[in-house]
Image (tube, rainbow, N blue to C red):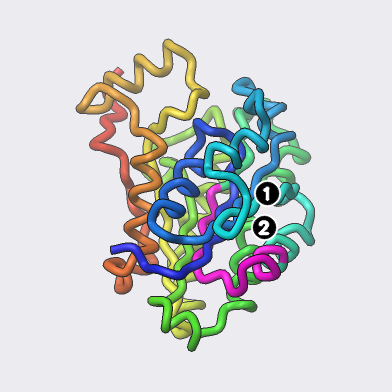
Amino acid sequence: MPLQGRTALVTGVSREQGIGFAIARRLLADGTRVFAHGWTPHDDEMPWGADRGGTAAVTAALGGEGDRLAYAHADLAEPDAPAALLAAAGERYGMVDTLVVNHARSSTYDLDGLTAAELDLCWAVNVRATLLLVQAYAAQYDAAAGKERGGGRVVLFTSGQHLAPMSQEIPYAATKGALQQLTLTLSDALVDRGITVNCVNPGPTDTGWATEELAAQVGRALPRGTWNTPDEAAAVVALLVGGDAATITGNTVDAESGFRRWVH
């Protein structure tokens, strides 16, 4: 059951094929105002690259900026960026009652290749920024006003490192593991204010990054033979931020469609 009259900050909305885009689109469809965040320089560094039309095309595909959608660029490696994002969202739409922390720095470094600089950058973007976003969100959240809207919601994103090794992505796995482990702690820190905190592991999701070989290999390990879609990840988020999930907090939802990692 969607909650009406709400405002969400969603990070990591930079590509039309991405999970962040799907989340923003779903929340808008459910009647939520969305303040979206993205940082395309990271996409430019990655094999998949940034969308050709840039974030202008992303916002246009979401219906364009206006009364229900706003967009901001921010490098979450910068210590002041999380608080600035919350302040900008509040200035535009008032109190943010829903925070979806979807952004991540992808990092394909194995044990031999990892560096202190890469570890520090992944920590700054994936963990430090997340904690500072939650801190800034909690500081601006008014429990009485939030209760009238159905309560506060925080959704974090992890990967599958708590279910199987990810030895080719050690900085990424370490930081995503930290978020999964922090979920229960953050939930306890915020539950007395009427805010739930949950974490989503969306499983293998087709956002256009996998090679044909990897897509086929992983597809064989999924019972239905295809990867999850960004819209399916967005549906899990919609459940967790909706009215039917008011009693769910401190949990990691493994939405993996029965992923059989032992199948090659």
Amino acid type at image mark 1: Val
Q: Is residue 171 visible?
A: no
At a point 39% along the width and 63% down the height, the residue shown is: 241
In the rendered image, the quadrant that contains the N terminus is bottom left
Q: Amino acid at mark 2?
A: Arg
Outermost residue, top direction? 213
Instruction: Residue 91 in the image: state x and y as whole percent.
Output: 70, 69
Q: What percent of the width, then of the height, locates residue 59?
A: 60, 42
Image quarter of residue 55: top right
In percent of the image, x 47 and y 68: which residue is there?
Answer: 6
Mark 1 and mark 2 in contact (Cβ < 8 Å)? yes
Q: Residues within 10 Å of mark 2 (few under 14, many from 20)?
A: many
Residues drawn in magenta: 88-102
Picture disc at residue 10: none
Q: Residue 94: say if magenta.
A: yes
Q: Is residue 6 above or below residue 40?
A: below
CA gap between label 2 and label 1 equals: 6 Å
160 left or right, relative to 77: left
Q: Which residue: 32% across, 57% down?
A: 239
Measuring from the top left, give residue 175's x and y in whole percent.
58, 48
Asked whether residue 231 is drawn in magenta, I would say no
Q: Is residue 202 left or right of residue 102?
A: left
Task: Give the camera-side residue of 43 and 132.
Answer: 43
Position of 58 relative to 246 (above/below):
above
The residue tagged 1 is 125
Q: Nearer the viewer, residue 205 or 29?
A: 29
The residue under label 2 is: 128
Mark 2: secondary structure: helix
**Which residue is pictured at 79% across the width and 61% down the height?**
80
User: At which x and y percent is residue 209?
Assistant: 52, 24
Q: Secondary structure at mark 1?
A: helix
Residue 179 in view (yes/no): yes
